[in-house]
Image (tube, rainbow, N blue to C red):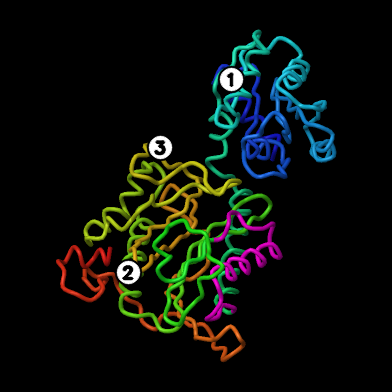
């Protein structure tokens, strides 16, 4: 697998007229070698780096200190070159010259995965090299996934879906948002490599924030809607799922907002395909919300790419001109958010195909109603889906009480 990726990289480097490539993005190093970073983030400061890959003539050498030699040695086709402490731009420049071995003139670097100061210093110390921004050379290879990668993403999404079922059977009135987030994280640590991002758990009104940090004091009440957004990691690849549930019986407005979001997602799933521009895929959801008079409550893009990183290209947004290609894996996650009431988001992860998509998400999408039970161990009842499938007709019941125009009714309380 990695040998094939190196061959594809050699072609990409030739097309970019590069003699060598200095790779600092940790996910790109993982993609090319299998070596995983221990620390979060893709920008490594020169003072304490985990390692940089130098690609030259089809050969990959990792510049790192002694902490990472065993990790490098465990991977075929990769060698290590020691960075002596204290690591600095001067030390990296010296080891880079050794690794290149002369003859290289044009070298690519990932301008989005180096600090300005480190890049400036490294270039000043290597005046014989012509440094060319090349952040897309490796990243572009990651956009369309292989069959092996899709299998890993499918497994990550299956573990994520299983976690949702676990939470539905476990959650109780009286728990805090942070209690639920901790249980999600604990489940994923037991059943995968952990969470692909910090779980989002929002009860009732806090669901109006698309990205939200769970509160340790906000307690779950009977009748509240719950937004859950989280993902597992399997062999380095990320899952991503958003589902909704209600503690007890969902009310009319819960159903109406939920059905609008579900219908918008289905519009996108019915139309998304290879050859489509990202902004056109976004428009499938956004235009539906506009016809229903609630587009102002849709506060983010329709989706994003997923792979080794939880957010990676392509991005399904209004301004993105990139064209969807077969094998790309993206989320489809429309949502509606109303301050003072809450929000609804429904998210699946799909593979783009020539004729449409393949959905990697197995978790059902009926609005889940949870039998009310107290956190102290009171009555436990089975989870049940909404008893009646509802269509997202053009109605105005998403409002709080009070007279408003049809458009204001569809938008809900501000």
Residue, x 51% and y 49% (percent of image)?
A: 329
Q: CA distance from mark 3 to mark 1?
A: 23 Å
Q: Is residue 81 visible?
A: no
Is label 3 in a helix, a strand or a loop?
loop
Residue assigned mark 3? 322
Nearer the observer, disc 1 or disc 2?
A: 2
Disc 2 crowd rating (10 Å Cα; few below 14, some 14-19, many 20+) is many
Q: CA distance from mark 3 to mark 2?
A: 31 Å
Measured along the vertical axis of the image, is residue 89 above or below residue 197?
A: above
The quarter of the displayed image where residue 323 is located: top left
Q: Quick one: 333 or 186, which is closer to the camera?
A: 186
Q: Is residue 322 visible?
A: yes
Residue assigned mark 2? 257
**Is 188 colored magenta in this rendering?**
yes
Which quarter of the rendered picture does the C terminus lie within? bottom left
Which of disc 1 and disc 3 is earlier in sequence? 1
The quarter of the displayed image where residue 77 is located: top right
Is label 2 in a helix, a strand or a loop?
helix
Question: Label 1 near label 3: C-beta < 8 Å?
Answer: no
The quarter of the displayed image where residue 26 is located: top right
Nearer the observer, disc 3 or disc 2?
A: 2
Is label 1 in a helix, a strand or a loop?
helix
Residue, x 56% and y 28% (percent of image)?
A: 137
Disc 1 crowd rating (10 Å Cα; few below 14, some 14-19, many 20+) is few
Would residue 178 be found to the left or right of residue 60 on screen? left
Q: Position of residue 51 (x, y in %)?
A: 73, 33
Which quarter of the rendered picture does the N terminus lie within? top right
Magenta-drawn segment: 170-199
Q: CA distance from mark 1 to mark 2?
A: 51 Å
The number of callouts visible is: 3
Disc number at residue 14?
1
């Amino acid at each position: 697998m990695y040998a094939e990726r190196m061959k594809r990289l050699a072609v990409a480097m030739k097309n970019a007229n590069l003699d060598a490539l200095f790779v600092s993005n940790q996910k790109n190093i993982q993609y090319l070698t299998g070596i995983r970073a221990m620390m979060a983030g893709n920008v490594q400061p020169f003072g304490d780096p985990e390692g940089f890959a130098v690609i030259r003539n089809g050969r990959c050498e990792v510049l790192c200190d002694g902490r990472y030699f065993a990790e490098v040695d465990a991977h075929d086709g990769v060698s290590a070159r020691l960075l002596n402490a204290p690591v600095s731009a001067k030390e990296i420049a010296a080891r880079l010259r050794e690794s290149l071995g002369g003859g290289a003139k044009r070298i690519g670097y990932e301008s989005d995965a180096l600090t300005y100061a480190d890049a400036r210093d490294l270039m000043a110390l290597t005046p014989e090299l012509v440094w060319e921004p090349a952040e897309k050379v490796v990243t572009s290879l990651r956009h369309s996934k292989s069959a092996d990668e899709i299998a890993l993403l499918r497994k990550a999404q299956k573990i994520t879906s299983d976690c949702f079922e676990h939470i539905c059977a476990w959650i109780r009135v009286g728990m805090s948002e942070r209690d639920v987030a901790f249980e999600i994280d604990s489940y994923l640590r037991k059943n995968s490599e952990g969470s692909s991002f910090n779980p989002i758990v929002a009860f009732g009104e806090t669901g109006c924030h698309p990205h939200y940090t769970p509160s340790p004091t906000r307690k779950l009440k009977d009748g509240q809607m719950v937004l859950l957004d989280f993902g597992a990691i399997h062999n380095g690849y990320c899952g991503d799922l958003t589902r909704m549930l209600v503690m007890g019986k969902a009310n009319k407005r819960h159903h109406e907002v939920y059905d609008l979001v579900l219908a918008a997602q289905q519009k996108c799933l019915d139309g998304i395909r290879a050859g489509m521009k990202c902004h056109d895929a976004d428009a499938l959801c956004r235009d539906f919300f506009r016809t229903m008079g609630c587009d102002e409550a849709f506060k983010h893009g329709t989706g994003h790419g997923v792979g080794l990183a939880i957010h990676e290209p392509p991005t399904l947004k209004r301004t993105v001109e990139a064209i969807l290609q077969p094998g790309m894996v993206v989320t489809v996650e429309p949502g509606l958010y109303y301050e003072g009431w809450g929000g609804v988001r429904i998210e699946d992860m799909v593979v783009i195909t020539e004729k449409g998509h393949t959905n990697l998400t197995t978790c059902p999408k009926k609005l889940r109603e949870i039998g009310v039970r107290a956190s102290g161990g009171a009555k436990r009842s089975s989870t049940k889906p909404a008893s009646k499938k509802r269509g997202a007709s053009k109605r105005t019941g998403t409002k709080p009480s009070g007279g408003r125009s049809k458009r204001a009714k569809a938008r809900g309380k501000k």
